[in-house]
């Protein structure tokens, strides 16, 4: 019965089509593995949660675009927490800015969790004072010219000095709750593009804003604006230990959906193994 429930969840929650999971594929390594691996499930349904995350991770092919499973799990926990608090007006969309990667890599991921697909994977800048090619330091302070960490929520759009832009509201006190006051917004820029990456050059840096290629900004903003989950990731030990979202003890909304799933799945699908780590 439990196998049937889990298989149903893969069909109902992950996408409407049948999912065949190959757990023998190696997951991408990640500088933040130690930090994120210590984040607890915050629920008694760890098996169902890990099944859901592995299903999404493999179906979307996130390893092939260098988003590690640990970073994805961390992002999913924050998304589910915000969902449980009714803090998301636009559900199903998760944006991850992986600052553990070089600025010359496509480290911005816009994911559709409902349709199980990568919508955008592109370049994104970090703050001038956060580092050079790699961002290593972060701030919530005015005039710091650094990027911030943690979970934010996308907000309204406007046309300003950098053209079409989108405001962000920080959801974590002490880490990013000054984002709006600091004018930390998503906007387009000519200093973030494929040409720089192809030459092996780092991207230009902002005053803390997640700037994306000018040619892509409109489509990205229109996709994620209006209350979706936005996550700035870095394997910072202090943030990992202190973040109230990452350390929250709550029931993941997806678990209820998994438990209520009732679609009959062919027995052949139940033969596929899944990747399950020991519960922390």
Image: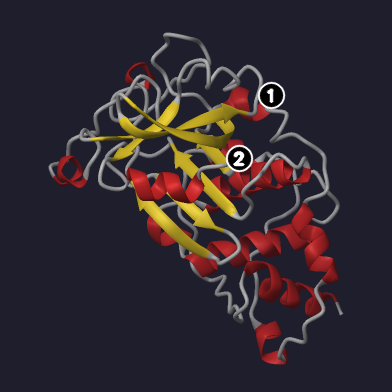
Label placed on residue 30: none
Crowding around mark 2 (Cα neighbors within 10 Å: few <14, some 14 to 19, many 20+) is many
CA separation in Å, label 1 and label 2: 13 Å
**Image height of 178 relative to 34, above or below:** above
**Which one is in front, 25 or 158?**
158
**Which one is in front, 50 or 15?**
15
Q: Position of residue 49 (x, y in %)?
A: 73, 58
Quadrant hosting residue 229: top right
Please indicate whether residue 235 sits to the left or right of residue 196 in the image.
Answer: right
**Image height of 108 relative to 48, above or below:** above
Q: Residue furthest top?
A: 143
Quadrant hosting residue 113: bottom right
Q: Position of residue 136 (x, y in %)?
A: 41, 24
Q: Residue at x 56, y 42 (%)?
A: 226
**Image height of 227 relative to 259, above or below:** above
Frontmost of labels 1 and 2 is 1
Write down the residue under mark 2.
36
Write down the residue under mark 1.
242
**Which one is in front, 201 or 156?**
156
Q: Position of residue 21 (x, y in %)?
A: 58, 75
């Amino acid at each position: 019965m439990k196998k049937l429930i889990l298989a149903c969840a893969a069909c109902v929650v992950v996408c409407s089509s049948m999912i065949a999971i190959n757990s023998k594929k190696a997951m991408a390594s990640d500088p933040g593995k130690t930090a994120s691996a210590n984040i607890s499930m915050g629920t008694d349904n760890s098996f169902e949660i890990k099944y859901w995350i592995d299903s999404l991770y493999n179906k979307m092919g996130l390893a092939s675009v260098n988003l590690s499973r640990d970073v994805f799990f961390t992002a999913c926990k924050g998304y589910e927490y915000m969902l449980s608090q009714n803090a998301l007006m636009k559900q199903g969309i998760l944006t991850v800015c992986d600052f553990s990667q070089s600025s010359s890599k496509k480290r911005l991921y816009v994911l559709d969790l409902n349709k199980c697909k990568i919508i955008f994977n592109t370049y994104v800048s970090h703050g001038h004072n956060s580092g050079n090619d790699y961002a290593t330091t972060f701030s919530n302070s005015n005039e710091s010219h650094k990027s911030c960490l943690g979970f934010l929520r996308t907000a309204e759009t406007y046309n300003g000095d950098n053209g079409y832009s989108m405001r962000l509201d920080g959801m974590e006190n002490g880490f990013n709750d000054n984002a709006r006051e600091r004018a930390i917004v998503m906007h387009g820029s000519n200093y973030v593009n494929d040409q720089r990456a192809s030459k092996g050059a780092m991207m230009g840096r902002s005053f803390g804003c997640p700037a994306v290629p000018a040619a892509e900004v409109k489509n990205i903003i229109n996709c994620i604006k209006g209350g979706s989950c936005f996550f700035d990731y870095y394997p910072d030990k202090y943030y990992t230990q202190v973040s109230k979202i990452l350390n929250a003890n709550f029931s993941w909304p997806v678990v209820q959906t998994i438990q209520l799933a009732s679609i009959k799945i062919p027995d052949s699908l139940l033969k596929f193994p899944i990747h399950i780590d020991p519960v922390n």
